[in-house]
Amino acid sequence: MAVRLGIIGLGPRAETLVAAMRDLPLIEVAAICDIVPERVEKMLSIFKRDGKPLPRTYADYHDLIADTSVEGVLVPTSWNSHLAIATEAMEAGKYAGIEVGGASSIDELWGLVHASERTGVSCMMLENCCYGRNELMVMNMVRKGLFGELVYAEGGYEHDLSEMALAVESGNERAIHNRFRRCDLYPTHQLGPIAKTFDINRGNRFLSLTSSATKQVGFEARAAAHYGHDGKWGDVRFAQGDVVTTVIKCARGENITLTHCVSLPRPYSRHARIQGSRGIWSEDCKGIYVEGVSRRETLLDIAGNPYEECHWDPVEKFYEEYDHPIWREYAKSGLVGGHGGMDGLVLSAFADAIRDGRPTPIDVYDVAAWMATTTLSEQSIALGSAPVAYPDFTNGKWMTRGRDATSGRFAL
């Protein structure tokens, strides 16, 4: 029987989610909600076009949450409303699935954690990158011991979104955050997979971070080039640095470096890197090196002394043997959903947990720890790149929780 979901917030991301759910028999979209009537009508037209039953419609999200037929709530709303809506959904006994982003305060994250603990229902971040083929495969290789003892990871969000400088005029919330905040605003795309690979909240945790931001050039240059210097928007100032670098220290001794860069020209990258005592994966190099498996070549230096040169193996070389079981099973049935099938997988994981009454594979402690990075990086930068401690949202449970804290077909 299909799990009945409601969607609150019908912007572009909601349309992508609906497109993914169209081909997922486990999910029925039972209700939709938005304060803009035109968005509701547009979403209904998609259901009509696809020949799907029309969901109930609401203008007030409180009414959707009160709908007794809805089992879980997806929240692809604006950043500042994700957590409040998810908290209310859990208080009503419904699983909450929120879209990615960072928090504005630690208090709202504690509220989310306490709501989940009180009600016994889960809040899951729909971080689709946790279900990327390469991320899953590298996690599988790490757990099979090929990378040795983990030491270091890198990741981030590097994407030319300088057109956001032109969206401030319309009140776009993401643009507003970049105008007034100086921090890693969008940390979870690679931090999520790294956290899962590093067993964060399950035998390991984030201890502290330091964060630094460069000056701002990209957004302001884009605004000036578009508007000129004759009006308000051409001279708008942005607090956000062009490149924000954050270093996280973990309880087991690993370090994680995150890079946030969305205002300068560059190709897209999540800058993924996982490094252990015997192996390394680099997204930007499109390669993996594993000691004893990958090729080493003996060369001579200028004095005729021999030295060894390591060579990357293409990531694809490892698919046949090390593809994660989740990906193998999903590929058999045909990948559905955007972002190379990642959307379909993360939505299936959410619905599967609701159906079985289990914790979601990305749980409320993960959501809180990952999203806290934004607020804590903001504090560190404001304090001159001083170290800032992460709260322990598990209240010590991380020391005894294992990976089996979340089970099911989509467990990470």
Image (cartoon, rainbow, N blue to C red):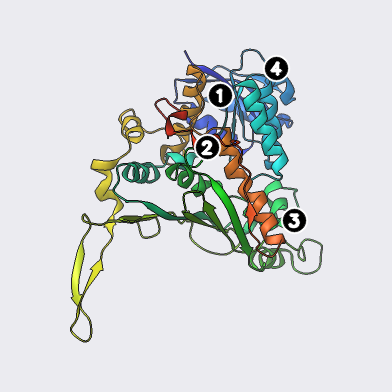
Q: Nearer the viewer, mark 2 or mark 3?
A: 2
Amino acid tagged 3: Phe
Residue 66 lies in what quarter of the image?
top right
Q: Are marks 2 and 3 in contact (CB under 8 Å)?
A: no
Q: Which mark is residue 101?
A: none
Query: Between disc 1 and disc 2, whose residue precedes?
Result: 1
Identify the residue at image location x=63%, y=58%: 387
Q: Which residue is mark 2?
A: 398
Q: Which residue is mark 1?
A: 47
Q: Nearer the viewer, mark 3 or mark 1?
A: 3
Instruction: Using a 10 Å C-alpha cutoff, classify the residue at mark 4 as few (fewer than 14 neighbours), some (14 to 19) or many (20 or more).
Output: few
Q: Which residue is mark 3?
A: 180
- Residue 311 is situated, as x and y percent measured from the top left of the image, at 26, 63
Q: Please give left or right for residue 364 compared with residue 300 in the image.
A: right
Between the residue at mark 3 and the residue at mark 1, the CA separation in whole angstroms equals 38 Å
Q: Secondary structure at mark 2?
A: helix
Q: Please give left or right for residue 152 compared with residue 397 in the image.
A: left
Q: Please give left or right for residue 54 compared with residue 141 in the image.
A: right
Between the residue at mark 1 and the residue at mark 2, the CA separation in whole angstroms equals 43 Å
Between the residue at mark 4 and the residue at mark 2, the CA separation in whole angstroms equals 33 Å
Would you say residue 126 is visible in this rendering?
no
Q: How many numbered discs, if any?
A: 4
Query: Between disc 3 and disc 4, whose residue precedes?
Result: 4
Identify the residue at image location x=46%, y=44%: 193
Q: Secondary structure at mark 3?
A: helix
Would you say residue 306 is visible in this rendering?
yes
- Quarter containing the C terminus: top left
Q: In the depicted view, which residue is nearer to us: 355 or 366?
A: 366
Amino acid tagged 4: Ala
